[in-house]
Image (cartoon, rainbow, N blue to C red):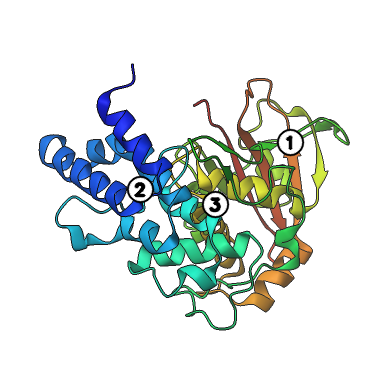
Amino acid sequence: MITYEDRRLRTLADEGRWPELLGAYRQARAAAAVRAGETRAAAETAALGHLIAHAAPPEVAVRLFDADGGPGTAAGVGDHDSGPLWEVLATRHSWLRLAPLLGPPAVRRLVAHTRVLAGEDLSYGAEPDPEGVPLVLEPWETAGWGEGGRVRDYQRAGGSRSSLLALPATREGLGPVELPPRGERLAGQRATGEFAALADWAQAACVRGAAPDAAVQFAPARLVTGGYVPFSAAYPVLVQAGAGVRAHGVARGRLLVWRALVAMTGSDGPDRAEVNALVARLRCFTWCDPADEVRYLHVALEDPATGLSWAVSGDDVE
């Protein structure tokens, strides 16, 4: 049922009366926050926030995240409809347009990395990333993406299109592999926690040995359908896992994957040369699980230089 309020907001959008729509968003969000709390307020106003982020001029759209309207009026990094509102905004305008307008540091950082994933080079002229993650894509970050591209394609009325989270995506190039007996996991490895942080459904483990020694930690049986793939095939799926279905965004996925790679090198912060050298020598093994549905990830990453391997595995049943 279309209510009077729905028709009024639609008319405002059709007439381009974006400041009035922003006022309506803020009023509705603040009222919902008082009535039911921040989480409920974000959910109730998500669709209107999406419309503003997608279609309003950037001077208006960035104000979704400004707290100058009072308590409960501003969207945060967790506000999402078909995707985070900041990611919707970042897909619509260049960093050149958005940089002078964006205020909140957390939103500003995520928007910047979204623009990097969209192909912009922000290594000159933008403030450095607080963790040192490069503001330009490395060559190995640009390969391996499917038709959906690195950043989701959002529609004005809601909905989005993105790359499929599936590794292995097909059985092509894979074959029967007998994994070794399951050995002991290594505790206390920082990268293990970073990989597990990609998603609440992701499991991670580290072993001393080759990639199959790590894979057997989560494989359904010792005899699997599996094989080696380039890291360029694994990277997009790792990023998508960190992005989540709707709530988190690909910028978060990229930042989490960089943290995991940095941890694998043993460095405290991103050293582009060290990470590039690691990626160049990584051996990646993937395997199938008969229980897989639509969104899943099974990969073991072997670093021959250290003799350590990490397995990351899980199925996002949602």
Report the quarter where the N terminus lies.
Answer: top left
Whole-percent x, y for residue 137 in the image: 67, 67
Residue depicted at x 39% and y 64%: 59
**Type of the residue with mark 3:** Val
Residue depicted at x 36% and y 37%: 11
**Type of the residue with mark 2:** Gly
Secondary structure under tag 3 reads: helix
Give how far apart the Cα atoms at labels 1 and 2 are: 30 Å
Whole-percent x, y for residue 94 in the image: 56, 66
Q: Quadrant of residue 71?
A: bottom left
**Type of the residue with mark 1:** Pro
**Front in this rendered view, residue 197 or 143:** 143
Which numbered circle lies on residue 250?
Answer: 3
Q: Earlier in the sequence, mark 1 or mark 3?
A: 1
**Front in this rendered view, residue 123 or 280:** 123
- Spot the residue most to the top: 1
Say if 259 sits above or below 11 in the image: below
Would you say the residues marked 1 and 2 are in contact, meaning their CB atoms lie under 8 Å apart? no
Could you tell me if residue 87 is visible in this image?
Answer: yes
Residue 278 in the figure: left or right of residue 11: right
Q: Quadrant of residue 274?
A: bottom right
Q: Earlier in the sequence, mark 1 or mark 2?
A: 2
**Front in this rendered view, residue 110 or 18:** 18
